Amino acid sequence: MSMTCEQARWFSETFAQLVRNVGQAVLGKDEVVRLVLTAMLAPGHVLLEDAPGTGKTSLARATAATVQGSSTRIQFTPDLLPSDVTGVTIYEQSTRTFEFHQGPVFANIVLADEINRASPKTQSAMLEVMEEGRVTVDGISHEVADPFMVIATQNPLEHAGTYRLPEAQLDRFLMKLSLGFPDHASSMQILAGAALRDRSSRLGPRIALHAVSDMTRLAETVHVDPAVLAYVSRLMEETRLAPEVRAGVSIRGALGLVRAVKVWAAANGRHFVTPDDVKHLAGHVWLHRFVLESEAEFDGVTAQAIMTRILREVAAPQARQQVA
């Protein structure tokens, strides 16, 4: 059953309330806030990469505060162990049994702060849970919370003591976003409230946990015309055929884009997806999945330039009038 116009209107209004709530902590960044919430409802995970002091952690905390669920923060460091993330099995002498003690990953929203500071061994502890929503310890699988979202941050400027995220882990993030510095008006507002160190601490939940799952399921009913699906598939194929690209977008990336554009359409009050939705989100969902040839990187070619060229060269289908 497809989403109705009334359901799309409710979705859009609720989504706008969430954006306004998070926007109280992250001033002047409504577009990024909308993208993060889109990823949450897709559902998927977000990697925030930006310079220090731009509000990455505040955005993650504000998102968690807006949802009436559990949230945890993991400070990734070089000495962090996989068991510090997933949990550990401990022998209890009183009961003479082994009991599993959950790690901080067992929460609805997990903030993985400076994820690239942990060793590859510890980073790999996130692979299973980000893809399958469970962790396996000592051969036993444990389901994590539902809904579940990882918001990870990393600093692209400082490389001492950091480990580059492997492609397999980057592919598990639905979006890679950058906040950037606030504009003049937002900066003035932030400076005027300098006494308040953490704006997200004053935020209250605007949506119940079960409603997040309801919105996710509702977004799945947004109509996607076969012509739009063919457009996504063609774009995916072109990323693989580009001579500057060693590895293009995977089918996981294409599926992630389709889920994201459904949420984006509903957030804009529509029960159907348009080609413009695909164009708007393609870069946010796909750019971090590109693996460029060494020669192309040396020549200064960027994934953004390749994506722009592909979107320009691949003809989008003509939008057709949709009915409820």
Image: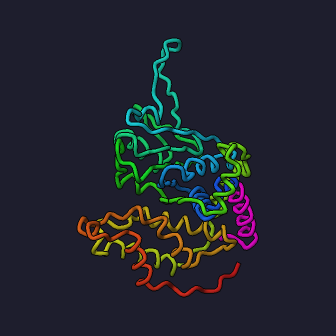
Task: Give the quadrant of residue 197.
Answer: top right
In this picture, residue 217 sits left or right of residue 14 = left
Image quadrant where one finds the C terminus: bottom right
Residue 38 picture location, percent across and down: 59, 61
Query: Is residue 123 magenta-colored?
Result: no
- Residue 69 location, quadrant: top right
Q: Position of residue 17 (x, y in %)?
A: 73, 59
Does the image show residue 220? no
Labels in figure, total = 0
Residue at 70 percent of width and 54 percent of height: 24
- Whether residue 120 is visible to the viewer of this picture, yes or no, is yes
Q: Which x, y percent locates residue 48?
A: 50, 54
Residue furthest toward the left? 295
Which residue appears at 41% of the width and 84% of the height?
A: 313
Q: Classify 275 as above or below 2.
A: below
From the viewer's perspective, tell me whether residue 319 is left or right of residue 67.
left
Name the foreground residue: 178 vs 267. 178
* Residue shown at the point (58%, 42%) measured from the top left: 145
- Nearest to the observer: residue 3 or residue 188: 188
Q: Main secondary structure of the magenta part?
A: helix
What range is drawn magenta here? 1-21
Q: Is residue 50 left or right of residue 184?
A: left
User: Does residue 200 lie above or below 77 as drawn?
Assistant: below
Quadrant showing the N terminus:
bottom right
Between 176 and 319, the one nearer to me in the picture: 176
Q: In this view, which residue lies farthest toward the top?
A: 94
Q: Position of residue 91 (x, y in %)?
A: 46, 18
